[in-house]
Image (spheres, helix red, strand yellow):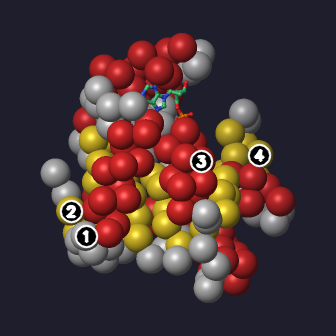
Amino acid sequence: MIIAVSGTPGVGKTTVSKILSERLGYEYVSIKDFALAKGIGEKVGDEIEIDVDELSRAVGEEFSGRDVVIDGHLSHLVPADVVVVLRLHPKMVAERLESRGYPRKKLAENVEAELVDVILVEAIEENENVIEVDTTGKTPDEVVDEILSLLNSGVKRRVG
Ligand code: DAT
């Protein structure tokens, strides 16, 4: 089973994906590292632009039939059995991105994206199985507990 963990930068995808993969005994995959290893993506300034179609094809070829947790803010666009969209109060997103040294414009863009549900909307457009989890005020372990209980309850789509 392929579980994608997506969300706005700073919401806790990497932290949660690593714990989730350990608890399930699944492989952990960073989508960015995977793309780079496959030579997908072009450096544009200090960012990497990734061709999503190419990435989706490569993920399908590499991981179908395997048990993986795919971490990254493009992971909701690749073929996955279920997409987990992590959410965080926009104020907290701002704090985390500020402490990461994001430039003001990039910080504002991401806070706004979190406010207007950009990743959630894209995920729902792409995948029938979307689980949304609000991480605000929760420890990473509590977030993983919630994901596991939603996965176990077989909820088709849990939003809100
Ligand atoms: P992402 O991969 O979504 O960019 P991350 O896992 O790198 O996010 O986490 C960003 C920062 O927030 C990092 O310093 C760890 C911290 N963090 C993640 N999840 C948290 C949680 N539930 N509670 C408190 N801090 C958390």
Q: Nearer the viewer, residue 42 or 82?
A: 82
SS at mark 2?
strand
SS at mark 4?
strand
* For residue 63, side relative to residue 112 (left or right): right
Residue linked to disc 1: 153
Q: Nearer the viewer, residue 68 or 30?
A: 68
Residue linked to disc 3: 18
Name the residue type under label 3. Lys
N-terminal of the pair, mark 1 or mark 4, is: 4
Query: Is 139 placed above or below 103 here?
Result: below
Measure the C-alpha gap from mark 2 to mark 4: 36 Å
Classify 10 Å Cα crowding around label 4: few (below 14), some (14-19), many (20 and above).
few
Name the residue type under label 4. Lys
N-terminal of the pair, mark 3 or mark 1, is: 3
* For residue 157, side relative to residue 141 (left or right): left
Identify the image quadrant of residue 57. bottom right
Percent position of residue 91, x then y? 30, 20
Q: Nearer the viewer, mark 2 or mark 3?
A: 3
Q: Nearer the viewer, mark 1 or mark 4?
A: 1
Numbered circle sitting on residue 43: 4
Residue 151 visible in the displayed image: yes
